Image (tube, rainbow, N blue to C red):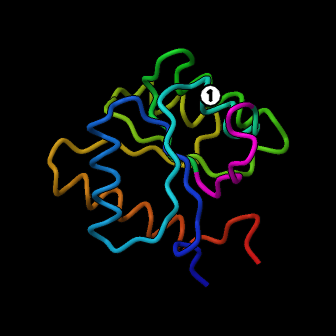
């Protein structure tokens, strides 16, 4: 069973151009993913906790998280997500520009499910997003699937 047709994905990204690229990558692949976007770490936590103004938003099946965010950075968000029992099962894909080994190690120490460096090339970026979608929403069995 593939979840991709009905999956709610939360993209936590502060760069409008990267958000547009992500959306374009999904469109180019014919994705039916319901993409929800927030631009900072505080909004990400409010979203997953269903706090104002996100009370009516669905719980995401997958979170795509940038590390370098305003207000609360991605590391802080990841730490909170994996520390709260009702949130820790949501897979978190770190998608960031950093290739620093210290960032990779820290993300995994904080229980990221995977770490993907944002490709600079447009075609490579599109392929990376599509590969994440295919794997996380097509191959992997997620906790809340029927």
> Could you tell me which secondary element the residue under label 1 belongs to?
helix
- Residue 117 vs 39, above or below: the answer is below
Start-end of magenta stretch: 52-62
- Residue labelled with disc 1: 77
* Side of 124 relative to 33 (left or right): left
- Residue count near mark 1 (Cα–Cα under 10 Å), binned few <14, some 14–19, many ≥20: many
The part of the image, by quadrant, that contains residue 84 is top right
Query: Residue 40: x and y, percent?
Result: 51, 26
- Residue 126 vs 52, above or below: the answer is below
Query: Residue 12: x and y, percent?
Result: 50, 37
> On the rendered image, what quadrant is the N terminus found in?
bottom right
Q: Does the magenta portion include 55?
A: yes
- Residue 80 vs 143, above or below: the answer is above
Q: Does the magenta portion include 54?
A: yes
> On the rendered image, what quadrant is the C terminus found in?
bottom right
Query: Residue 68: x and y, percent?
Result: 42, 23
Query: Residue 113: x and y, percent?
Result: 58, 48
* Side of 94 relative to 128 (left or right): right
- Residue 5 vs 23, above or below: the answer is below
């Amino acid at each position: 069973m593939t979840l991709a047709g009905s999956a709610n994905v939360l993209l936590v990204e502060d760069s409008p151009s990267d958000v547009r690229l992500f959306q374009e990558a999904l469109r180019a692949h014919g994705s039916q993913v319901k993409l929800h976007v927030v631009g900072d770490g505080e909004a990400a936590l409010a979203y997953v906790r269903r706090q104002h103004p996100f009370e009516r938003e669905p719980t995401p099946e997958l979170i795509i998280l940038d590390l370098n965010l305003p207000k609360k950075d991605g590391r802080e968000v990841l730490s909170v997500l994996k520390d709260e029992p009702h949130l820790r099962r949501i897979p978190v894909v770190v998608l960031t520009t950093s290739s620093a080994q210290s960032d990779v190690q820290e993300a995994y120490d904080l229980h990221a499910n995977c770490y993907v460096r944002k490709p600079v090339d447009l075609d490579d970026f599109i392929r990376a997003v599509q590969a994440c979608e295919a794997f996380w929403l097509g191959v992997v069995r997620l906790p809340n699937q029927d």
